[in-house]
């Protein structure tokens, strides 16, 4: 079978597969742990004086579901993390980390200082690796999408992502 067709078939199966409760529990627990780590490493992650309004938050939550959650996870944990070997996990994680400063320079100029901060890139490295492991273990991309989305909306809801408004 053509390698591209095989990758697309595997990705399709991972979109159609719903993992068991243990995968969801590990996903949420790991995400909460990484959010705590992010808050300790970057106290500016929380800025309660700059929390978004309810309408800003809802709009951001909706947009964040598609970009970055579904879009980035499809690219980095979908296409780049196949066939889910150590090498693909490493390459996917490195591409995910590289994408953040590049994306800031191309699309979010207000985020440059944040997305080029070494502490932020360390957090993104842990997240990228964690999401790759989640996908491999759970045989589904949905926990990665959910966790990525939760991280963005928690960050926004706590006022740390002022440049997204």
Image: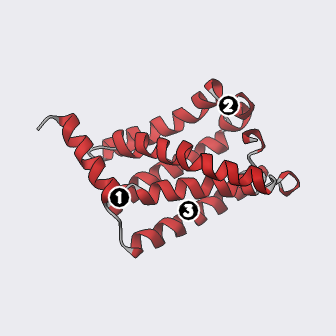
Secondary structure under tag 3 reads helix
Q: CA distance from mark 1 to mark 3?
A: 16 Å
Q: Is residue 12 left or right of residue 71?
A: left
Residue 77 visible within the image: yes
| Quarter containing the C terminus | top right
| Rendered residue at 34%/62% (across/down) | 137
State the residue in front, 142 or 66.
66
Secondary structure under tag 2 reads loop
Q: Nearer the N terminus, badge 2 or badge 3?
A: 3
Q: Nearer the N terminus, badge 2 or badge 1?
A: 2
Spot occupied by residue 104 in the image (x, y as percentages of width and height): 64, 30
Above or below: residue 30 compared with residue 151: below
| Rendered residue at 57%/54% (across/down) | 149
Q: Which residue is mark 1?
A: 140
Spot occupied by residue 18 in the image (x, y as percentages of width and height): 35, 65
Q: Which residue is mark 3?
A: 31
Q: Nearer the N terminus, badge 1 or badge 3?
A: 3
- Res. 108 mark: 2
Q: Is residue 22 left or right of residue 115?
A: left
| Rendered residue at 66%/33% (across/down) | 116
């Amino acid at each position: 079978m053509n390698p591209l067709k095989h990758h697309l078939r595997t990705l399709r199966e991972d979109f159609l597969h719903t993992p068991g409760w243990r995968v969801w529990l590990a996903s949420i627990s790991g995400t909460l742990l990484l959010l705590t780590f992010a808050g300790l490493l970057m106290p500016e992650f929380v800025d309660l004086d700059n929390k978004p309004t309810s309408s800003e938050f809802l709009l951001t939550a909706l947009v964040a579901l598609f970009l970055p959650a579904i879009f980035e996870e499809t690219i980095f944990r979908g296409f780049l993390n196949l066939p889910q070997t150590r090498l693909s996990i490493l390459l996917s994680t490195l591409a995910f980390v590289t994408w953040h400063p590049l994306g800031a320079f191309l699309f979010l100029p207000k985020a440059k200082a944040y997305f080029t901060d070494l502490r932020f890139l360390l957090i993104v490295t842990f997240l990228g690796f964690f999401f790759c492991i989640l996908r491999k273990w759970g045989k589904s991309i949905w926990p990665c999408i959910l966790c990525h989305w939760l991280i963005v909306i928690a960050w926004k809801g706590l006022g740390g992502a002022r440049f997204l408004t």
